């Protein structure tokens, strides 16, 4: 049976459109060549050109690559992962591939434990001198001990960047001011590097930022007051640097903050009274700073606090009774300060606390904790190094195994509870022996 001419024409057109559509959904040859250059410079897991001739085609991709269909009806690389299996691993000679910035549709790229042997730098193309203004939204280089040198100022050309993670590398030098022109940034993590110098005041330009982590560097100078302009900030970690001065008063404007860590710096002086406006704060960690002030009562108004750590910071005076209002508190660390007076009675009603360290102070009086409180905390309670503190004899006798590290009231010297119990038993033994001796003496004589 013969087909009509019109039917043959339609079949031919359909065949041509099918072929064109198939070709259109392939990658552009220039992009294919770029991805192979990247893979060959990073990983020797495969012969990439032979094993995956069409990297984005279904059935020809590898774990660690994702592609999307673009508006031009071509497939484009949208995500790359390197470092640990099942993603492609990195060879010992791997160097940072600046060609990733030649992939205009790339949105996310991750290098985890990739550059571990041969030193390499975060750099732009030597021909271009700047990063391509790509659609890159997430750039993550984490745990790369051979990634050295400065953060290049050209990074400011990545205008679509929302997440920048350059953590646990060996980057050095100052933080480039250009980073703070990336207004789309939501998360900035430069922690665990060797960055130096002050934090630029342009920090305040990142008004969409929700997370900022600059911890474990060698940053200096004061915390810039412009930090108060980061109204969306929820996490702030500036710990383990060499910041000086006081906490800026503008910190009170960060009302969405849930986590703040400023420990192990050189901060001193007053805590802004406006800190009580941070009613979303759940974690405040500020150990190891030379504060030399009385313990601020304002902390007791932060009712959502779950952890409060103020150890090794030369705080003086009494523990404010307002601290007893922190009903959500699970950890309180005030050790190695110069605190005096009694432990607030209200501490015994902190039902969610599981770690309490008041050791190494000048506290005194009877410990206001009952048997159930002492049993619940056990070894997570440390009151040692407070010569004036003592435990009531009844609690000492009932809680021989709890290790608060203090003596028993009325025993003359601060002996441990276990010793006190043994001491009490020995007294009972001698009283009983004396009574037996007295009865036997009367019976015999």
Image: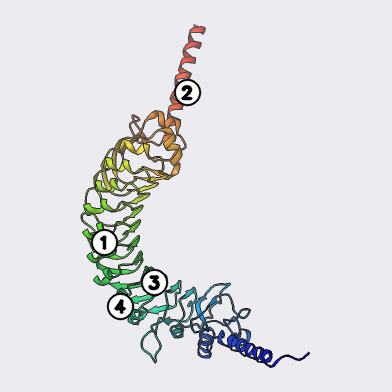
Numbered disc 1: secondary structure: strand
Task: Estimate the x, y position of residue 390 in percent, counting from the top left.
Answer: 34, 35
What is the C-alpha distance between the residues marked 4 and 3?
A: 14 Å
Give the residue drawn at x 32%, y 81%: 153
What is the C-alpha distance between the residues marked 2 and 1?
A: 57 Å
What is the C-alpha distance between the residues marked 4 and 2?
A: 79 Å
Q: Residue furthest right?
A: 1
Along the line of sight, the residue nearer the viewer: 182 or 22: 22
The nearer-to-camera label among 4 and 1 is 4
**The disc label shown at residue 429, or none:** 2
Neighbourhood count class around disc 4 (C-alpha, 10 Å): few under 14, some 14–19, many 20 upward: some
The nearer-to-camera label among 4 and 2 is 4
Q: Is residue 182 above or below residue 295?
A: below
Side (left or right) of 326 relative to 104: left
Q: Is residue 192 above or below residue 430?
A: below
The nearer-to-camera label among 1 and 3 is 3
Where is residue 234, by image quadrant? bottom left
Provide the residue designation for mark 4.
Answer: 178
Where is residue 255, by image quadrant? bottom left
The nearer-to-camera label among 4 and 3 is 3
What is the C-alpha distance between the residues marked 1 and 3?
A: 31 Å
Q: Tell me if label 2 and label 1 are in contact, CB under 8 Å.
A: no
Side (left or right) of 326 relative to 290: right
Residue 291 seen by the camera:
yes
Neighbourhood count class around disc 1 (C-alpha, 10 Å): few under 14, some 14–19, many 20 upward: many
Numbered disc 2: secondary structure: helix
Q: Is residue 95 above or below residue 289?
A: below
Provide the residue designation for mark 1.
Answer: 266
What is the C-alpha distance between the residues marked 3 and 2?
A: 74 Å
């Amino acid at each position: 049976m013969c087909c009509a001419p019109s039917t043959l024409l339609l079949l031919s057109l359909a065949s041509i459109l099918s072929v064109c559509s198939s070709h259109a959904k392939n990658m552009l040859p220039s992009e294919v060549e770029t991805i192979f250059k990247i893979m060959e410079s990073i990983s020797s897991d495969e012969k990439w050109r032979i094993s995956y001739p069409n990297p984005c085609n279904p059935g020809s991709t590898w774990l660690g690559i994702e592609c999307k269909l673009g508006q031009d009806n071509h497939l484009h690389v949208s995500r790359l992962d390197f470092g640990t299996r099942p993603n492609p691993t990195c060879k010992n000679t791997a160097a940072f591939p600046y060609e990733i910035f030649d992939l205009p549709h790339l949105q996310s790229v991750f290098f985890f434990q990739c550059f571990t042997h041969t030193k390499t730098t975060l750099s732009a193309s030597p021909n271009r001198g700047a990063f391509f203004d790509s659609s890159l939204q997430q750039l993550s280089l984490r745990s790369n001990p051979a990634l050295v040198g400065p953060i290049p100022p050209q990074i400011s050309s990545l205008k679509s960047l929302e997440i920048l993670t350059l953590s646990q590398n060996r980057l050095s030098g100052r933080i480039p001011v250009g980073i703070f022109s990336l207004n789309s940034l939501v998360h900035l993590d430069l922690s665990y590097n060797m960055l130096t110098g002050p934090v630029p005041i342009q920090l305040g330009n990142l008004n969409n930022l929700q997370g900022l982590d600059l911890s474990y560097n060698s940053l200096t100078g004061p915390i810039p007051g412009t930090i108060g302009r980061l109204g969306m900030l929820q996490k702030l970690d500036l710990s383990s640097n060499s910041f000086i001065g006081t906490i800026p008063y503008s910190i009170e404007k960060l009302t969405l903050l849930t986590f703040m860590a400023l420990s192990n710096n050189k901060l001193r002086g007053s805590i802004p009274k406006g800190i009580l406006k941070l009613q979303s704060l759940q974690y405040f960690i500020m150990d190891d700073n030379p504060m030399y002030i009385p313990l601020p009562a304002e902390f007791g108004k932060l009712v959502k606090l779950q952890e409060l750590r103020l150890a090794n910071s030369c705080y003086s005076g009494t523990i404010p009774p307002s601290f007893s209002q922190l009903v959500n508190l699970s950890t309180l660390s005030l050790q190695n300060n110069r605190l005096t007076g009694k432990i607030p009675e209200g501490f015994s009603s902190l039902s969610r606390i599981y770690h309490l360290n008041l050791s190494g102070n000048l506290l005194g009086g009877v410990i206001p904790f009952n048997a159930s409180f002492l049993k619940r905390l056990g070894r997570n309670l440390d009151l040692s190094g407070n010569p004036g503190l003592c435990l009531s004899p009844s609690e000492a006798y009932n809680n021989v195994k709890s290790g608060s590290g203090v003596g028993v009231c009325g025993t003359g010297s601060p002996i441990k509870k276990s010793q006190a119990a043994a001491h009490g038993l020995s007294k009972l033994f001698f009283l009983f022996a004396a009574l037996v001796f007295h009865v036997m003496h009367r019976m015999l004589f």
